Image (cartoon, rainbow, N blue to C red):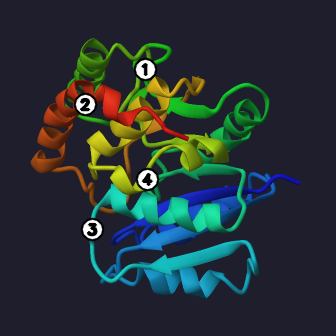
Amino acid sequence: MKKTLIIIPTYNEIENISAIIEAVFQTQIPLDILVVDDTSPDGTGKAVEGLMDRYPNRLYLETREEKQGLGAAYIHGFYWALRRDYQYIFEMDADFSHDPKELIPMQNLLETQADIVVGSRYINGVNVVNWPMSRILLSYFASLYVRMITSMTIKDATAGFVGYRRVVLETLDLNSIKFVGYAFQIELKYKAWINKFKIQEHPIIFINRVLGKSKMNGKIIWEALFGVLFLRLNKRKFLSKK
């Protein structure tokens, strides 16, 4: 059986982490979960440890010594997955903005027709709940900007609910990933796209977090704006030599 791993990066997600772990396992998909925690001072890591006896050999925790950003957490998780022969690897938020039930159709797409599946907020209009209008406009027009600069056809390039076939992560040079926030999500999709991997979007409804605090800040937004230009100008450098 081909193995699936869900990577959930955390920093101060004590209000959500136990519930999201339970919800993911309730999908009944044969999968494992890796929580990559940046030494959350609120005890997120301890909460994960408290559940590990309930899910032996299915729930894992990697604790990093300091907060280094979303991208670095995912890269850590990707390498962990590749060392353990997982064939399908997912990125997923801890705050229930990504519905665990969508893992079922997304997993099916990876198994049958896509190298990457993107849980997309914008493939069928704008499917975002409880975001302020300013945040919706920022995200939506950021995706338009990415398409204009890069020529990618992906409508939700900043999406963080993404599944990869193993071969994608093996082919991309993960050590060369430059960005950590929104731009990290764009960078992976762009590098996969120029290397001819098949990317398919799956429509989801994105629900803004109810508990905990958003990690969004101005630095992440500016990184995305300038990061897209960097990616486009250096396109030839990102073609795989494998």
Q: Label 1 belongs to which residue?
A: 122
Q: In this view, does 182 lie above or below 84?
A: above
Q: Identify the amino acid type marked 2.
A: Asn
Dot 3 or dot 2: first in sequence order is 3
Q: What is the crowding at mark 3: few (fewer than 14 residues within 10 Å), some, or many (at least 20)?
A: few
- In the rendered image, residue 38, in percent from the top left (x then y), is placed at 35, 75
Q: Helix, strand, or loop for circle 4?
A: helix
User: Real-space Cα distance between discs 3 and 2?
Assistant: 24 Å
Location of residue 231 in the rendering, given as x and y in whole percent from the top left corner: 26, 31
Q: Is residue 170 above or below residue 228?
A: below
Query: Label 2 near label 4: C-beta < 8 Å?
Result: no
Q: How far apart are marks 4 and 1 (CA)?
A: 27 Å
Q: Which amino acid does label 4 sit on?
A: Leu
Residue shown at 58%/41% (left/top)? 168
Q: Mark 2 points at which residue?
A: 234
Position in image of residue 145 (x %, y %): 23, 19
| Residue annotated with mark 4 | 174
Amino acid of disc 3: Gln
Q: Where is residue 152 in the image (x, y as percent from the top left)?
A: 39, 17
Q: Are marks 1 and 2 in contact (CB under 8 Å)?
A: no
- The local crowd at label 4, few if under 14, some if 14 to 19, many if 20 or more residues have their Cα within 10 Å, is some
Mark 1 residue type: Tyr
